[in-house]
Amino acid sequence: MLIRSRSPHDLTESDTTPEALYWNRRTVVAGMLAAGLVPQAVGAVQAAEVNSPLPRLAGKRTRTLDEEWTSYDSVTHYNNFYEFGTGKEDPAERAGTLRTRPWTVRIDGLVAKPQTIDIDRLTKLFPLEERIYRLRCVEGWSMVIPWTGLPLAKLLALAEPLGSAKFVAFETLRDPRQMPGQRSPVLQWPYVEGVRLDEAMHPLTLLALGLYGRVLPNQNGAPVRLVVPWKYGFKSIKSIVRIRLTDRQPPTSWNLSAPNEYGFYSNVNPEVDHPRWSQARERRIGDWLPRKTLPYNGYGEEVAALYRGMNLRRYF
Amino acid sequence: MLGRSGVHMLMALPLLGLVGQWAVAIVTADPRAAGLSAEPIAYSINTLGLWALRSLLLTLAITPLRRATGWGWLAPLRRPIGLWCFAYATLHLSVYFGLNLLGSLEELAKEIAKHPFILFGMAAWALVLPLALTSTRASIRRLGAKRWQTLHRLIYGAAVLAAVHFILRVKGFQIEPWIYAAVAALLVLARVVKLSPLSRR
């Protein structure tokens, strides 16, 4: 039996920034402040109020994180969304061509009640939650993002998965007129992702509709995207049009592109290097120096049980 | 006609640009507005690496270009451009080593041993290092022109290694590093077969 004396939301000592880095960053910022180099307090405030023309999308905050939020500007201008180009700022520049209304999400496959849900209905189906999660990119950078959305489990329950369903497959919109990056052979289109059903049903797994209290900007995967905070960012597929339950492991885009580099699981793991670079550290956007990467991106206490007994080097 | 000081000025521009961007980023505390992206250190490493590769290819282009056009004034420009290649490569490596690996030699050794991508980059730098060290006239005299020239053929190896390093860097299939690799291959080939008909004059 699992006995937990404290809430899994609580951070442990190991979750926090190592003291050396902490002082380092503070010292740098403090020094710059003293020298009059920084006009405003960098990184002190976590203003929910952002300067954005996007409609508000409120959610009850159900999960906090005692780490500095990545600025809205960085969250929305440093994106990997190859449907709009391979440069980090390409999506912010080019995603204006994406039309997010009308938009529907098809849920089918091994479910009792296959259905097509309009995005505006999806927004109102369940009370929305705001959750502050870490995001760790496979490239070695990370952010802290306040997402607004609903647990994927609630939506899947609506469709009533059959007993034979073992995996959940996701698909991004395919339309090169809206997503000009799909004319490039950089990946096979449409972008597809997948997780095991128990990973999909895990309470941490979120379908995000917004961030920073506003609807998702196009470049962040509007109108609806997945957020699986203990996996590398590319698992969190953007602009979803289809969710299909299956009995076998579905193909996933980066795994198709380079199977030796990107596994199906892709759980954040500082012990298992990417073939081209180490995953031991990460560069938190807004920090000067890298920090240590945590197993399962710091969510091990909640998700490690999903992988008990598995060889994590083999199932990377 | 471009002189040596003109070359130095031109080749310093990307570095001055980067330093200027850093100055703005520090003053405004907004690296993205300064053009350094949200990850100024990664951006700087990439930019320095790209200019190392560009100046390497430019160095290789001088002789075939001189042969094809007969422009003798190009010849003295090769050494300063080559030295800038070394400067950019060294800065590229230093920022990576100092800020990504926090100056740990142990980690650097691990990275080189485990990741071919890093190995190719390090090897390219190791090949241009002796060329920079023997770039003076005195070195040519000391080594003898023949031996000096043989040593400096290492630049072709560096070009190939650097191009592969770049190809290994990107995710998915991207065209840009292949364009650089094609240019590198062409320049190596140009020297091997002396493509230009003027060279036989």
Image (cartoon, coloured by chain):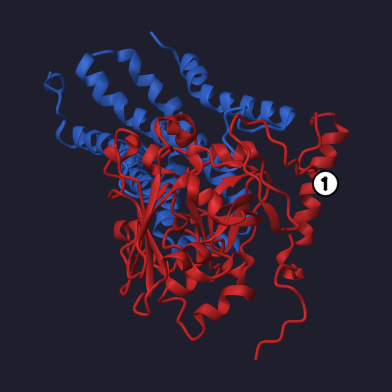
Chain colours: A red, B blue
| Whether residue A288 can be seen here | yes
Q: Nearer the viewer, residue B199 or A212?
A: A212
Viewer-proximal residue, B85 or A316? A316
Q: Which residue is mark 1?
A: A27
Q: Residue A222 vs residue A192: left or right?
A: right
What percent of the width, then of the height, locates residue A214?
61, 40
- Residue at the image point whose x is 82% and y is 46% from the top: A27
Q: Is residue A34 left or right of residue A46?
A: right
Image-based side of A236 in relation to A70, left or right:
left
Relative to A48, residue B35 above or below: above
Q: Residue furthest bottom?
A: A1
Q: In which quadrant will I find the N terminus of chain A? A: bottom right
Disc 1, SS = helix
Q: Which residue lies most toward the right here?
A: A34
Q: Residue at x 30, y 73 (%)?
A: A248
Graded by Cα atoms within 10 Å as few (under 14), some (14 to 19) or many (20 or more), the crowding at tag 1 reads few
Give the quadrant of the C terminus of chain A.
bottom left
Image-based side of A223 in relation to A27, left or right: left
Q: Could you say where residue B111 lies in the image, as x and y percent from the top left? A: 50, 61
Please, is residue B173 above or below residue A90 in the view?
below
